[in-house]
Image (cartoon, rainbow, N blue to C red):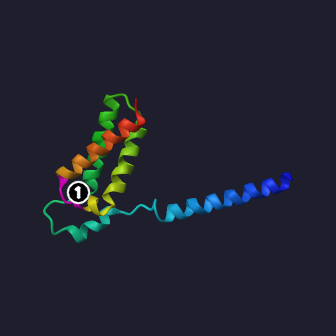
Amino acid sequence: MPAMNNSTEQEQTISTVRVMRRQEETSYANTDYLECLPDLMSEADPIDATCRSVMAQWCYQIVDFCNYKRETVATCMSNLDRFLATPDGQQVMLDRNQFQLAAMTSLYSAVKVHEQ
């Protein structure tokens, strides 16, 4: 009987890994949202990689000042990147003030979830 149980566990593990890989390829796939900018360049002042870097540095300054974990910034930037890859996020990329607000909101959310 233990051999059958072991076989069932292996099948479940294989099934779980398949589902996880499918999710990685579809739901969790990241796109380079900055590649979309040439299509959106008709607008005045879209964000760029420098804007993202400046906001990441600002987030690190905030978490360091508040004695939060620096990993919180990684969560913040991951959430921000995922948002910017969506259709609503593309609109935010066209306005630096909206981008800053989105980054601040992402940091706030990450702090609320991951810090005491």
Q: Residue at the spot x=45%, y=62% of the render?
A: 29
Q: Nearer the viewer, residue 72 or 1?
A: 1
Report which quarter residue 84 is drawn in.
bottom left
Judged from this view, the residue extending furthest toward the front is 1
Q: Nearer the viewer, residue 71 or 53?
A: 71
Q: Nearer the viewer, residue 36 or 113?
A: 113
Q: Residue at the spot x=69%, y=57% of the render?
A: 12
Q: Is residue 79 above or below residue 33?
A: above
Judged from this view, the residue extending furthest toward the left is 44
Question: What's drawn in magenta, residue-wise?
Answer: 91-96
Q: Is-magenta flag for residue 2?
A: no
Q: Residue at the spot x=79%, y=53% of the render?
A: 5
Q: Is residue 47 above or below residue 55?
A: below
Report which quarter residue 41 is drawn in.
bottom left
Q: Residue at the spot x=33%, y=51% of the render?
A: 80
In the rendered image, which quarter contains the C terminus? top left
Rendered location of residue 99, percent (x, y): 23, 52
Q: Is residue 64 above or below residue 24?
A: above
Judged from this view, the residue extending furthest toward the right is 1
Rendered location of residue 100, percent (x, y): 22, 47
In-image side of 34 versus 114 (left or right): left
* Three-letter code for the amino acid on which mark 1 is drawn: Val
Q: Secondary structure at mark 1?
A: helix
- Pointer 1: what residue? 92
Rendered location of residue 75, percent (x, y): 40, 45
Report which quarter residue 106 is drawn in.
top left
